[in-house]
Every structure is written in C-alpha cells, then in structure tokens.
Image (cartoon, rainbow, N blue to C red):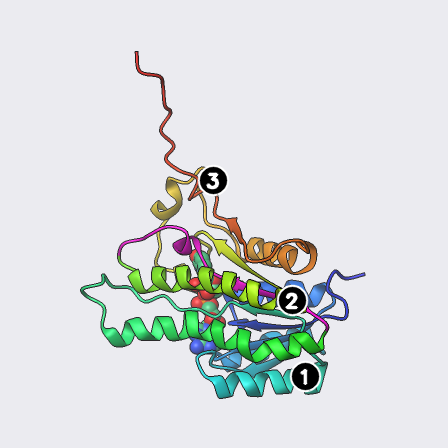
C-alpha cells in the first residue's frame, strides 16, 4: 500500500534535480504525478519512464495562464489535486550592487510569484479534493543570509512567509501549507559549488535529491498535525558556530 495512493500531485520543476526525485518517490508511493516544468525533453522522458498515470505538462510557473491550463489538464486527466510541491526555482549570482533589476525581478517572479500563483490556482482544486497539502521548497537561504545571492535569499525568505500566510488562510479548508529548507544538495543548481561550501557543516557533505524527496513525502503524507512551519534538512549548517565554549576563569 503506497503512502500516496489515490492522491494527485503536481510537482513544479519536476524534470530534474530535487523535483525529479520527488516525482519518482511520489509515483513509487502510488500518487498520480504531474511533472510541470519548462524543460520539455527531460520532463517527457521522466514521465515516460515512470509510466501512466504520471504525465508531463509544460508550465512556466511565473505565468497565471500556464497554471490555469496545468490545473485544468490535471483535473481532466487525473482528478482534483491533493498535493502541490512548489519546487521550481532559479538562482542568479550577483551582489546587490552588481545584479540588474531585471535579474532580481526574474528570481522573484519564478521563486515567489510562481509559488503564489501555484497556491491561488490550485486552492479550488484542493478544496474539491476535500483538502490536501502544499509544500513550498524554500532553502536554508530562507533561514539565514548569504552574500552574492541576495535576490535568491530574499525570494526564499518570502516563500517562507508566504507559507505561513497561506497556512492560515487555507486551514479552514483542511489544506496544510509547509516549507522545506534544504541545505546544499547536489543538482545542476549547485554544479559550480565546490566541497568547501559544506566543509564547515557538522555533517560535511552535500545532500542528495532523494533525501529531500523523503522529507517532502514525510510532510505530504505523515506530518498531518503540521502547518505553516519549516522542515529543515541541511547537515546541521544552520545549527550555529562549532566553537567549544569554556567558562571564563
Ligand atoms: N540544490 C540545492 O542545493 C538547493 C538547496 C536549497 C533549495 N533548493 C531549491 O530546490 C528547488 C529545486 O532546485 P534543484 O536544486 O533541483 O535545481 P535544478 O536547477 O536542478 O531544478 C530546478 C527545476 O526548476 C525548473 N524551473 C526553473 N524555472 C522554471 C519556471 N519558470 N517554471 C517551471 N519550472 C522551472 C528547471 O527547469 C528545473 O527542472 C529550487 O526551488 C531550489 O531553489 C535547492
């Protein structure tokens, strides 16, 4: 018996990386999965590999029309949506002084407005399903600051706050909304991060997309008394300095 039997899930950014790992695990747990992405070749290939009822839809999450079409297709083919994973995201490098306003806006459009549109366009479907869960993939960049990626940091804090507002608005309809905050994970997004990025962590390694997928499954299937809260998996990166304190003499 799969932990997501009878559930219909939309996973944005599901063509590769963390989203693909979530799509694979959800399909293995019995969900009907809609992989929504802009990478059509990768998305179609993964959907074919996982087989029906899993399918691929082209969706740029920053477009409201795109979301409406994706939700309509999901309902038509699989039924009302009961799990939404707002995972699509982009990272653009640049200090606040270096980055162009256009680049800043694109990060916000995809990472924040994309999830906001996802919440508002799927909410009626989640109600029709009798309730459900929305999992927003934030980051440890939504828990602390990092130099050189200010737009990304701002977007991931915004997603954390949006999660709380949505949790309050949707709780009366039995819809939970939580955020997941991974540390550095080995995907295309971190291809140019070297091992020094994780060397200072209590667990000094990159995470794997499958580890994030297991956390997302837990939030979706098991964390039934949790809403509006953060689930962190970061090898201890945000725990604090590892300095050993001794009493002053
Ligand atoms: N890799 C990490 O270390 C890490 C850490 C914390 C959080 N995250 C977050 O996890 C999520 C997934 O990242 P990843 O590491 O798998 O990166 P990735 O680049 O491998 O995957 C991101 C996916 O999102 C898709 N995407 C980008 N823009 C889109 C758009 N406008 N519409 C639809 N799809 C779009 C991409 O095509 C891609 O398939 C992101 O939100 C990212 O910020 C990643």
Counting residues from the N terminus, which is met first, the one under dot 2 or under dot 1?
1
Residue 13 image offset from top left, x and y in percent: 51, 72
Compared to residue 134, the image places residue 244 above or below, namely: above
Could you classify mark 2 by the number of other residues whose Cα lies within 10 Å: few (under 14), some (14-19), or many (20 or more)? few
Nearest to viewer (mark 2 / mark 1): 2
Name the residue beneath numbered marker 2.
172
Residue 199 image offset from top left, x and y in percent: 38, 41
Residue 62 image offset from top left, x and y in percent: 44, 79
**What residue is shown at x 45% (from left), y 64% (from top)?**
159
Compared to residue 218, the image places residue 162 above or below, namely: below
Residue 149 lies in quadrant: bottom left
Q: Secondary structure at mark 2?
A: helix
**What residue is shown at x 18% (from left), y 64% (from top)?**
97
Compared to residue 200, the image places residue 71 above or below, namely: below
Say if residue 54 shows up in the picture. no
Question: Magenta residues, as a range?
Answer: 130-147
Rounded to the nearest angstrom, the CA distance separating label 1 from label 3 is 42 Å
Say whether residue 106 is magenta.
no
Name the residue beneath numbered marker 1.
75
């Amino acid at each position: 018996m799969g932990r997501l039997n009878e559930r219909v899930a939309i996973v944005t950014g599901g063509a590769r990386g963390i989203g693909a790992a979530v799509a694979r695990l959800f399909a293995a747990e019995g969900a009907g999965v809609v992989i929504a992405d802009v990478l059509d070749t990768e998305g179609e290939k993964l959907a074919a590999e996982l087989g029906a009822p899993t399918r691929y839809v082209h969706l740029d999450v920053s477009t409201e029309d795109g979301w409406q079409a994706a939700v309509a297709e999901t309902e038509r083919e699989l039924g009302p949506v009961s799990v939404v994973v707002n995972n699509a995201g982009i990272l653009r490098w640049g200090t606040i002084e270096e980055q162009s306003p256009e680049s800043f806006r694109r990060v916000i459009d995809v990472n924040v407005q994309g999830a906001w549109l996802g919440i508002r366009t799927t909410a009626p479907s989640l109600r029709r399903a009798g309730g459900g869960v929305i999992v927003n993939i934030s980051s440890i960049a939504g828990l602390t600051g990092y130099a050189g990626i200010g737009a990304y940091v701002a977007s991931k804090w915004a997603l954390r706050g949006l999660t709380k507002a949505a949790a309050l608005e949707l709780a009366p309809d039995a819809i939970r909304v939580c955020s997941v905050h991974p540390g550095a994970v080995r995907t295309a997004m971190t291809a140019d991060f070297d091992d020094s990025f994780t060397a200072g962590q209590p667990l000094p390694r990159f995470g794997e997309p499958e580890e994030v997928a297991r956390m997302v499954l837990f939030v979706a299937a098991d964390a039934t008394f949790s809403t509006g809260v953060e689930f962190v998996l970061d090898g201890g990166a945000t725990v604090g300095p590892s300095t050993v304190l001794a009493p002053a003499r």
